[in-house]
Amino acid sequence: MPCKDILIVDDDDSIRATLKLALEFEGYRIFEGSNGQQALSTLSQMNHTPCLIFLDLMMPVMDGWSFCAALKNQSHLAGIPVVVVTAFPEKAKTLKEASEVVAKPIDLDHLFQIANKYCGRVAKA
């Protein structure tokens, strides 16, 4: 049975809302964080470990690099695939924990392919 839970971490409300709407339409359950610290809090409150995290790098409070470092230090979360979604894909190359890098603006078909790859195809809600 495919996992339906995806965490989106981005400080841009409109990007989070767009990704959430598109992925929910495809049948995924979306959780959100507007920065790394908020995302860690969200992860600690979730009943299930998400199958995937879409992560922006440049955020206030806690950026993507710091979030990944914190994630790596929690053994039950360290194995979650992290797909960096950024306007600066060259900067993402410094993040060893990234499973993939997606450049903004985001192609939704590519986003769905990535979600299906890591979570499995889910039935639309």
Image: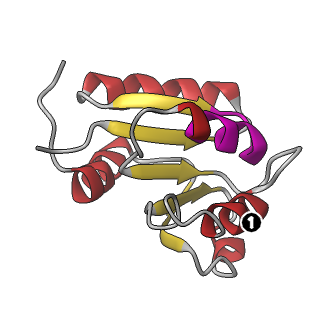
* 34 inside magenta stretch: yes
Q: Residue sitting at 87 percent across and 44 percent down?
A: 60
Q: Residue sitting at 23 percent across and 27 percent down?
A: 27
Q: Which residue ends up furthest to the top in the rendered image?
A: 125
**Disc 1 designates what residue?**
65
Q: Residue sitting at 29 percent across and 58 percent down?
A: 118
Task: Give left or right: position of 20 versus 116.
Answer: right
Task: Give left or right: position of 55 versus 64.
Answer: left
x, y percentage for residue 30? Answer: 43, 29
x, y percentage for residue 105? Answer: 55, 47
Task: Identify the image quadrant of residue 98.
Answer: bottom right
Task: Identify the image quadrant of residue 92.
Answer: bottom right
Task: Out of 53 and 111, give the one closest to the viewer.
Answer: 53
Coloured how?
secondary structure
Vertical placement of residue 87 versus 112, above or below? below
Q: Residue sitting at 77 percent across and 44 percent down?
A: 37
- Give the prevailing secondary structure in the magenta stretch: helix
Vertical placement of residue 55 versus 43, above or below? below
Task: Out of 107 and 67, give the one closest to the viewer.
Answer: 67
What secondary structure is marked by label 1? helix
Task: Out of 117 and 14, give the one closest to the viewer.
Answer: 117
Q: How many marks?
A: 1
Which quarter of the rendered picture does the N terminus lie within? top left
Q: Find the magenta span and give its range.
A: 33-43
The amino acid sitting under disc 1 is Trp
x, y percentage for residue 3? Answer: 25, 43
Task: Give left or right: position of 47 versus 70.
Answer: left
Which quarter of the rendered picture does the C terminus lie within? top left
Vertical placement of residue 61 versus 89, above or below? above
Task: Give left or right: position of 6 versus 91.
Answer: left
- Within 10 Å of disc 1 (Cα), the crowding (few <14, some 14-19, many 20+) is many
